[in-house]
Amino acid sequence: MSLEVRVPALPESVTDARVLTWSKGPGEVVREGEPLVELETDKVILEVPSPRAGVLREILAEEGARVQADEVLALIDEGAVSALPGATPTPPAASQPTKSPTPLAEEGLGEGGPQTGASPHLTPSARQLVRELHLDPSQIPSRDGRIQKADVLAYLDAREGQVPERHPDLAATRSAPGADPQPPESTGETATGPRPERRVPMTRLRARIAERLLQAQQNAALLTTFNEVDLSAVNALRARYKETFEQRHGVRLGLMAFFVKAVVEALQRFPVLNAAIDGEDILYHGYYDIGIAVSSPRGLVVPILRNADRLGMAEIEQGIAEFARKAKDGSLSYEELTGGTFSITNGGVFGSLLSTPILNPPQSAILGLHRIQERPIVKDGQILVAPMMYLALTYDHRLIDGREAVQFLVAIKELVEDPVRLLLRV
């Protein structure tokens, strides 16, 4: 009996998906619940499991094809384990309940727990890298039997000199976190020799990023105002309590929690920066969902800290750390990437000293953080050396006046330079 494997229901804002990778080929045995194909959308990667055990008879949507919800991807012959030519017997496995497709997560967590036995469980991104570099998964150290992309890269770093340095995925990861894979450079060619080029399709996420950035530039009156902040007080507070904080909460005390807290306080003072233009109306949000820009191997993503005004410092740091892990593994969900009333981006982690961030539509403002640099400042008539950071606030001038934008940024500066204000709310 032939069973159809269909594209799962897609979120309302997603119209189609692209077939990314098939983990099985025609004639191969598949187990019930086993990952069969990955579908790429403009936000996350969906993993479609096999609904039944059997043999993959035919693939109807090849890699790279655009597909829509409920479209047939493949046909499976139930129970015909050895009926087709070339079918490879697979040791029987305990039947797993059929799972609805979920956004790509750490495999083993969403597929019945850690795998046991000789074969480690690979995440799709790790599996693709292992296949392209012809690696032996059993040689790669893993966590609880699950191999992630980060584990593969760490393994390659450990045996550096034995791996193809110009593998696009590896080169991109080592050169610039969050960057798209770059074409390999020419090797062993003279200046007058061939100049190779390589054309690759733009990922759905990169295409979506391009679309939204262009939308922001075309549909908003963007203006950026700048200030600088002295981080001496924050650094002293972190140094004093970092060990106690980490022991109690299991996460380090970083800078982002202070800025998230300061942003929420400033938004409460100047609610128009937490608002959005909706047609001919202004939509004021009575909640504070803060987007945190995070770099991922597929591009920049902005997961949302919901109700940030209700979160403590530890909860903020834990949330951001979890976002970073999920972005690296490709396991962020649609819900985590949807919405938001204000965003924060930190180009300083890559060394940026000053930049003008672009809005994340339909939001009306975004705060850019930058590299901390020791500079001489004058304080109380004395020249001091202090850890300084430039702040940049880009806003939609159609809605937000310059006076409000400047006062908002000054409020953040005052709150961060004197963190006690965050506790006393003054």
Image: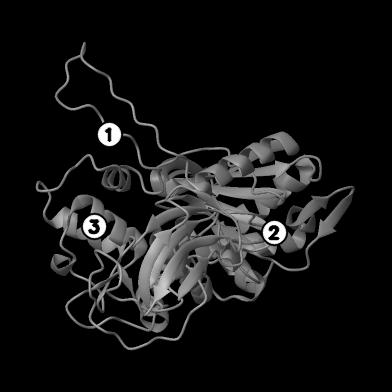
Q: Which residue is mark 1?
A: 184
Q: Which residue is mark 2?
A: 341
Q: Nearer the viewer, residue 289 or 185?
A: 185
Q: Is residue 271 visible?
A: yes
Which of the marked residues, 1 or 3, is nearer the chain's N terminus?
Answer: 3
Q: Which residue is mark 3?
A: 130
Q: Nearer the viewer, residue 363 or 301?
A: 301
Q: Nearer the viewer, residue 216 or 193?
A: 193
Q: In which image quadrant can residue 219 be found?
A: top right
Element under disc 1? loop
CA separation in Å, label 1 and label 3: 18 Å
Which of the marked residues, 2 or 1, is nearer the chain's N terminus?
Answer: 1
Q: In screen coordinates, is 51 left or right of 404?
A: left
CA separation in Å, label 3 and label 2: 40 Å
Q: Residue type at mark 3: give it.
A: Val
Element under disc 2? loop
Q: Residue furthest bottom?
A: 94
In the image, residue 91 sits, relative to residue 323, either above or below, namely below
- Where residue 180 appears, as percent x and y from the top left, is 40, 43
Foreground mark, 1 or 3, reads 3
Q: Residues within 10 Å of mark 2 (few under 14, many from 20)?
A: many
